[in-house]
Image (tube, coloured by chain):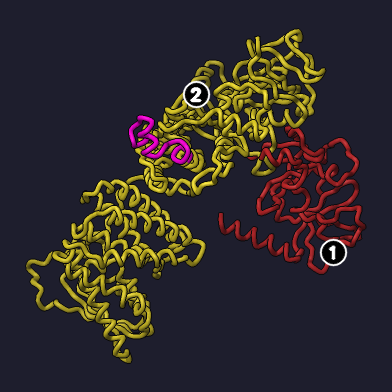
């Protein structure tokens, strides 16, 4: 193609679109499962496959288009009602979708591994050959064509290199699907020497001519060293909308010729089998993200959000002009204009900030969409019957959070399937319905998003958890723990209650990693369980990672920011309320709890106004269920701060989650409470006291 | 943007291949004149107090707001274990781009004063002699003589490596 556009960029677009198409295929295939083929669903799947095939051929990804072609052929038969939609067929299709996804995602890294594709192709062909009775009766010709394919097609596609005669008779409505024969000819001409001869002009009735119809046929002869594959590629988009005969000329051997006849037969047979496929229709504009495990670099934004943003920018411009009217005239009588302007400006800024954030917000269905498939596959593998219920899938959260929450969610869901839900027999014996229920909920709660994973399985065995924790030294032998704390022991490193390491979970790193990943996002996870009734995992996440509501605190000359979400309260304590354990570690009693005092000036090695506990304030902060009192000199204002990474130019620091720039242009560091606790640990402070004081 | 990026990459890879010719910005530090590749210099700004980061080595003075980016500031005297002097009117921060472990960072270097820009040919630059095991010479790219003065040309990427300095085990575990 002699286009000036960067092909690599377009190819990237193709990859993204194909990924979306594959997601659509997958979710629609899942809808198919009950058995009967709903024609709308079938068409959606078919269109997605067709677009991938066409796109693959256009961009020269022959493996993809070839494989997609096989998938498409099978889909087409189903769509036409020539073949029943069976579970095996759906399974095979799902595997093919996976395979195509793998192939597409590795496209950018060079040659694709086609072994799996070849295996699946063989399976697809086997299925095609076991034609259902309907197929024989209605689609004999199409069937014949595709049966011929395995014998002839893959081998002879590229064997003949030379000159070709092409007879091309497009259907009358080819122009309506945006395919222009001229474009095809131009492309062919770029391959070699091309002679074009139009046919059928003599029969045209000029009186009734419709300029949107293509009534001509062409005889093309192409001279040069050209492979069949190159020609097929050119016609890839239109092969369903025309009669196409491609014959080698000149020194071709007889075998080549007979193969070519086969191939042409196949090509000409195809339109008979697929007359309805004439529009490479745009895939339905269903917003689907690539599988959430990949971090995509582009984002699709609802046009309403963009419009709202443009409106706001308009308002900002008005505010600016209002303020510039004030320019130069610093009279007292003008002051009210300045005040008004500033009020408006601050409102504009906040609204602008909110709508810019909204652009990054995506519904959680992007992360949830993979679960129907996962639950189905995992359930089948484990021999468990599972019903998945999803609520609140339109809850929006930040794109970055969304991308990173995918893996922890998968882990928790697998865990519930593997360890939580029981097999039908066990469930029956326990008097429960044979089908287990797995529920995924998402909703907003204050400035947080809460995701729940609930199963009605066996629940977590607390005695077993406790005995394992004791065995592994995670809990002191004589330590008494609340039920809640026992349940949450499963999130500790190196903990796994399953003796056998299964394919799905039980590596003993899982829950610990889940907790850490969620903590990295500024959230936390807790578990609740009731033996015999089921368990519930609750994930709390901040809505966004870019802005946080912060409390500014002062220690000496330095200003630090503590996230308001982690602050429980701020109190003034007298030195008489402080107990010293072994002379050094300070504890103070807050109602029925003893909390350690973390002296920020000591931890950070800076000068404080006063080291006397009476002069300062204690900020009680909580992280991972642990509370500490952070000793600071003074509280300053609360404000929203934009988080700047410290890592981008420096590196990650324990106890500091980032930095921000204050109104006066100076940099202030943002405290990371879990990190502070760990830093406090490392510096020899003690936190291992019972959480509840015994009265 | 990508074209610019490519250009920078090309230039840096050239430099890595030992082609040290080019323009150098020189600065003074404890009486000696040091040079850094001028293409790495983003800007020169006056000294402004930085926000200290707790628990960092002494030569990391803290972070500064550079038009919205948070940039660490290194005191080169402390980095080279030279005697510290109070910052004066000539004290400047040279903001450079350094690449280590494939990660590009913007870092400010506090020096006594900026001096000149010299154009040096490959032939004028000689490799740093072995100065004995006690002195760490990996950040010295070479030496050059200009107007009877010795210039110490620095390898910008090696001046500080944040990924290796002062990480103790507990910190690494936390990250």
Residue linked to disc 2 = A341
Mark 1 or 2: the one toward you: 1
Q: Which chain is red?
A: B
**At 21% across and 49% down in the image, what residue appears?**
A36
Q: Indicate which disc residue A642 carries.
A: none
Part of the protein shown in magenta: A415-436
Chain A, which colour? Answer: yellow
Residue A458, image x and y in percent? Answer: 44, 32
Is disc 2 placed on a helix, strand or loop?
helix
Q: Quadrant of residue A662?
A: top right
Residue linked to disc 1 = B127
Looking at the rendered structure, whether the residues under marks 1 and 2 are on a common chain is answered as no
**At 50% across and 22% down in the image, what residue appears?**
A343
Residue B134 visible to an observer of this rendering: yes
**At 26% across and 68% down in the image, what residue appears?**
A129
Check the picture and name the quadrant holding the N terminus of chain A.
bottom left
Residue A143, image x and y in percent? Answer: 21, 68
Chain name for mark 1: B
Q: CA distance from mark 1 to mark 2?
A: 62 Å
Proximity of marks 1 and 2: CB atoms separated by less than 8 Å? no
Q: Is residue A23 above or below residue A14?
A: above
């Amino acid at each position: 193609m002699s286009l000036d556009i960067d092909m690599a960029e377009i190819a990237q677009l193709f990859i993204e679109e194909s990924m979306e198409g594959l997601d659509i295929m997958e979710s629609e295939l899942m809808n198919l499962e009950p058995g009967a083929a709903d024609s709308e669903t079938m068409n959606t799947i078919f269109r997605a496959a067709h677009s991938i095939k066409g796109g693959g051929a256009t961009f020269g990804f022959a493996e993809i288009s070839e494989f997609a072609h096989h998938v498409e052929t099978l889909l087409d038969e189903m769509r036409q009602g020539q073949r029943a939609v069976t579970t095996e067929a759906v399974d095979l299709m799902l595997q093919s979708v996976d395979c195509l996804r793998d192939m597409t995602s590795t496209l950018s890294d060079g040659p694709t591994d086609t072994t799996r594709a070849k295996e699946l192709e063989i399976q697809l062909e086997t299925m095609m050959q076991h034609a259902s009775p309907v197929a024989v009766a209605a689609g004999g010709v199409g069937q014949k064509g595709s049966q011929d394919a395995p014998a002839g097609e893959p081998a002879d596609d590229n064997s003949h290199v030379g000159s070709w005669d092409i007879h091309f008779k497009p259907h009358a409505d080819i122009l309506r699907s945006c395919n222009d024969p001229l474009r095809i000819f131009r492309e062919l001409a770029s391959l070699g020497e091309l002679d074009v001869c139009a046919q059928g002009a003599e029969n045209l009735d000029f009186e009734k001519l419709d300029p949107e119809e293509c009534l001509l046929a062409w005889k093309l002869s192409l001279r040069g060293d050209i492979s069949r594959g190159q020609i097929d590629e050119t016609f890839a988009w239109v092969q369903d909308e025309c009669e196409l005969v491609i014959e080698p000329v000149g020194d071709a051997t007889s075998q080549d010729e007979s193969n070519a006849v086969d191939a042409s037969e196949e090509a000409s047979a195809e339109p008979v089998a697929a007359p309805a496929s004439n529009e490479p229709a745009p895939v339905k504009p269903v917003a689907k993200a690539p599988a959430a495990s990949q971090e995509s670099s582009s984002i699709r934004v609802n046009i309403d959000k963009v419009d709202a943003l443009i409106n706001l920018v308009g308002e900002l411009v008005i505010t600016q002009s209002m303020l510039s009217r004030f320019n130069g005239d610093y009279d007292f009588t003008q002051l009210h204009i300045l005040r008004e302007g500033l009020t408006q400006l601050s409102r504009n800024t906040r609204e602008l900030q909110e709508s810019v954030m909204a652009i990054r917000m995506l519904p959680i269905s992007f992360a949830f969409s993979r679960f129907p498939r996962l639950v189905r596959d995992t359930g089948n593998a484990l021999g468990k019957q599972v019903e998945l219920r999803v609520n609140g899938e339109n809850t929006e959260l930040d794109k970055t959070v969304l991308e990173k929450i995918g893996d922890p969610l998968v882990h928790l869901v697998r865990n519930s399937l593997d360890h939580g839900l029981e097999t039908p027999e066990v469930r029956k014996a326990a008097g429960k319905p044979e089908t287990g229920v797995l529920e995924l909920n998402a909703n907003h709660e204050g400035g947080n998003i809460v995701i729940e994973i609930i199963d009605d399985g066996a629940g977590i065995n607390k005695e077993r958890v406790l005995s394992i924790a004791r065995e592994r030294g995670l809990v002191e032998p004589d330590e008494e723990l609340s039920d809640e704390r026992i349940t949450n022991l499963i999130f500790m490193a190196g903990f796994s209650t399953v003796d056998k390491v299964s394919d799905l979970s039980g590596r003993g790193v899982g829950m610990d990693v889940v907790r850490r990943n969620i903590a990295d996002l500024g959230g936390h996870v807790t578990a609740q369980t009731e033996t015999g009734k089921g368990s519930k995992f609750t994930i709390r996440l901040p809505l966004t990672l870019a802005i946080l509501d912060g409390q500014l605190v002062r220690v000496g000359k330095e200003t630090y920011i503590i996230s308001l979400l982690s602050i429980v309260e701020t109190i003034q304590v007298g030195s008489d309320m402080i107990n010293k354990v072994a002379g050094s570690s300070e504890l103070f009693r807050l109602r029925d709890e003893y909390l350690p005092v973390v002296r920020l000036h000591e931890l950070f090695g800076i000068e404080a106004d006063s080291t006397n506990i009476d002069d300062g304030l204690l900020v009680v902060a909580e992280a991972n269920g642990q509370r500490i009192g952070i000793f600071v000199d003074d509280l300053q204002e609360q404000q929203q701060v934009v988080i700047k990474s410290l890592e981008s130019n420096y590196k990650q620091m324990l106890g500091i989650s980032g930095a921000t720039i204050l109104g006066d242009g100076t940099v202030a560091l943002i405290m990371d409470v879990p990190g502070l606790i760990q830093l406090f640990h490392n510096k020899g402070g003690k936190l291992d006291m019972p959480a509840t004081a015994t009265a | 943007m990508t074209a610019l990026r490519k250009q920078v990459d090309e230039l840096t890879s050239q430099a890595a291949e030992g082609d040290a010719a080019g323009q150098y910005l020189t600065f003074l530090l404890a009486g000696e004149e040091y040079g850094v590749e001028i293409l790495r210099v983003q800007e020169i700004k006056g000294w402004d107090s930085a926000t200290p980061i707790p628990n960092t080595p002494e030569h990391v003075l803290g972070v500064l707001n550079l038009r919205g980016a948070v940039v660490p500031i290194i005191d080169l005297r402390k980095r080279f274990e030279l005697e510290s002097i109070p910052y004066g009117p000539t004290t400047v921060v040279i903001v450079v781009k350094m690449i280590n472990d494939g990660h590009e960072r913007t870092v400010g270097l506090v020096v006594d004063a900026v001096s000149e820009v010299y154009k040096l040919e490959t032939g004028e630059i000689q490799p740093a002699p072995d100065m004995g095991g006690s002195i760490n010479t990996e950040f010295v790219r070479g030496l050059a003589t200009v107007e009877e003065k010795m210039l110490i040309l620095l390898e910008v990427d090696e001046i500080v490596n944040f990924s290796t300095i002062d990480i103790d085990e507990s910190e690494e575990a936390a990250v």
